[in-house]
Image: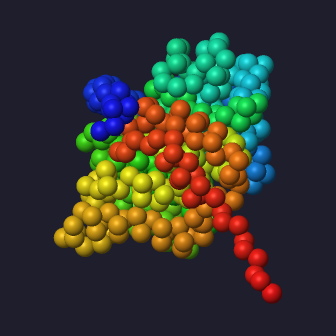
Amino acid sequence: MNVKKVPYRASHTMMKGAMAVLKMPTPSTLVGPGMVKRFPEIIKECKVYKILVVTDKPLMNLGLLDSFLNALKNNGIDYVIYDGVQPNPTFENIEDGLRMYQMSGCDGVVAFGGGSSLDCAKIIAARVTNDKPIEKMKGLFKIGRKLPPYFAIPTTAGTGSEATIAAVITNAANHEKFAINDPKLVPLATVLDPELTLGLPPSLTAHTGMDALTHAVEAYIGWYDTPFVKEKALSATRIIMNDLEAVCENGKDVKLRRNMLVASYEAGMAFTRAYVGYVHAIAHNLGGFYGVPHGFANAVILPHILEFSKKNAEKKLAELARYAGVGDPAESDDILTRHFIEKIKNMNRNLGIPQTIDALQMKDIPELAVRILKEANPTYPVPRIMDYNQCVDILTNLITPPVTKQQN
């Protein structure tokens, strides 16, 4: 092992022991069609009487919240709506939501939407009880005080934020996108209602599904793979590899939509206990620099990082392949690893996901590489540790090749 990497592995070894004994909260969960109408009953049991609903304008315009808002009224719960969440939630979104919470006299927060709404709502709730700048919450275990009652209603099957200790926030001033990780960010309860996802277009279904697959795979091949992590990551991987393309073909299939929500939730439970890896480090920084959607970025980057990591993660990638039904289980680990990576590449092709990122520019690669490695090393327990030159090479491979002009 490179002597420079020894401190990283020492850190991973210590953290693995800590993560194995650290108790992570698990939200109460309602699963099934129409369950969003029952969810206010749980909120009421938590003695919440006026709640801040955090969402975005597109969902409001679609009327997707109507049945939930009516159910709140029927349960005697008042509400105000903050619908200013952006695709990559910013400090300004959080402060705007916080002001609405305080001015309206709320005593709880519910997120309704995709990962951006869930992450934004988490940090709004954290700011209610923690009088500290958002940037001071960056990293691990920086939230001192317990949040007010916080609940999550995901409308996409991808981020797993309804099960995780993480929230990802963007500082628009310096284009930095970073994670805040603390067990206090896990919601008290969540609802996985497939009817809320029936209207998702195929492209968003694909990107969020590949996001969830990335969570499961990075959790499984990392160093913090406890039996619980393995169980949830294996289950999520099998569901997504077998159902994602089908649900993109038939988005009105309630059973498939339910399966994908469960897989996203399980992948969230896995990676919140095992962390993620270089796919996420790169995706976060591409999101901060260019606003590249997170799920899309993860989907594009995942095969590149698996190719980089495959020798060090061969046994685990082969296990994932066998469990997901990829290849012949009697084949060698090496061959199954190749099948597994090729399966992901084929899924991307079939789902219309490219191999490269249009927004990425060569001039930004040196700074991006520094930011990526600062985020990932040594925090993420990756199977193979990356250095600066290797990071530059991977980023270079992610650049869309220029169109060659044909000679007359």
Q: Is residue 7 above or below residue 203?
A: above
Residue 319 is left or right of residue 299, and the answer is left
Residue 390 is left or right of residue 338, and the answer is right
Quarter of the view holding residue 43: top right
Counting the numbered discs, the total is 0
Where does residue 244 sit, x and y in percent of width and height? 49, 65
Where does residue 8 sit, x and y in percent of width and height? 37, 30
Q: Is residue 320 above or below residue 386?
A: below
Quarter of the view holding residue 366: top right
Q: Residue at x 42, y 54 (%)?
A: 308
Where does residue 181 sit, x and y in percent of width and height? 50, 28
In-front residue for pair 254/271: 271
Q: Residue at x 66, y 26 (%)?
A: 124
Where does residue 407 sit, x and y in percent of width and height? 77, 83
Residue 349 is left or right of residue 229, and the answer is right
Q: Is residue 159 above or below residue 243?
A: above
Work out which quarter of the rendered image holds the C terminus and state it.
Answer: bottom right
Quarter of the view holding residue 180: top right
Q: Residue at x 61, y 49 (%)?
A: 294
Q: How is the image coloured?
A: rainbow
In-front residue for pair 259/30: 259
Q: Is residue 404 visible?
A: yes
Residue 50 is left or right of residue 181, and the answer is right
Q: Is residue 78 visible?
A: no
